[in-house]
Image: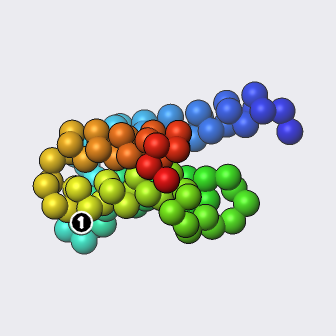
Amino acid sequence: MNPLFIIIGMAGVTYLTKALVLLAGERVRFSPAVRTALGFVPVTVLTAIISPMVLAPHHVGLELSWRNPQLVAATVAIVVSAWTRHMLLTIALALAVFFAWQYGLLH
């Protein structure tokens, strides 16, 4: 199948779903349970995107070792975030650890 048709199809589906929500506007009411569930969508999508990149960065299986800079940096990010709750510090330290680990400065 032609990749151009796939891209156009995906764009159409994305546009249609967003347009339907915007056109429906206030006429559609979600129950509190659905609203609560929708609140978890961004976290779930972000986890689904990041987890494979951290756990299997070379797409050949899980790399659960200290030699995986993505895993080490993600672990640092989790610890710093839980400890400080400071987003900029978390990002800065995780990136510093990642690049230092990547280029062999820390292992």
Residue drawn at x 61%, y 64% is 63
- Residue in the image at 36% along x and 40% along y: 96
Please tell me in which quadrant of the rendered image residue 5 appears: top right
Q: Of all residues shown, which one is farthest toward the right?
A: 1
Mark 1 crowd level (few <14, some 14–19, many ≥20, 10 Å Cα): few
Which residue lies under the disc numbered 1? 36
The tally of labels here is 1
* Residue at 61% in and 53% down: 57
Nearer to the camera, 31 or 44:
44
Q: Is residue 43 above or below residue 100?
A: below
- In the drawing, does residue 56 fall left or right of residue 80? right
Question: Where 102 falls versus 63 (above or below)?
Answer: above
Whether residue 41 is visible, yes or no, is: no
- Residue lying at the far bottom of the rendered structure: 33
Q: Tell me if 104 is positioned left or right of 59 in this view.
A: left
Dot 1 amino acid type: Thr
Q: Position of residue 16 (x, y in %)?
A: 51, 38
Q: Is residue 83 above or below residue 88?
A: below
> Which residue is more in the foreground, 40 or 12?
40
Residue 25 x %, y %:
27, 42
Residue at 83% of width from left, 33% of height from top? 2
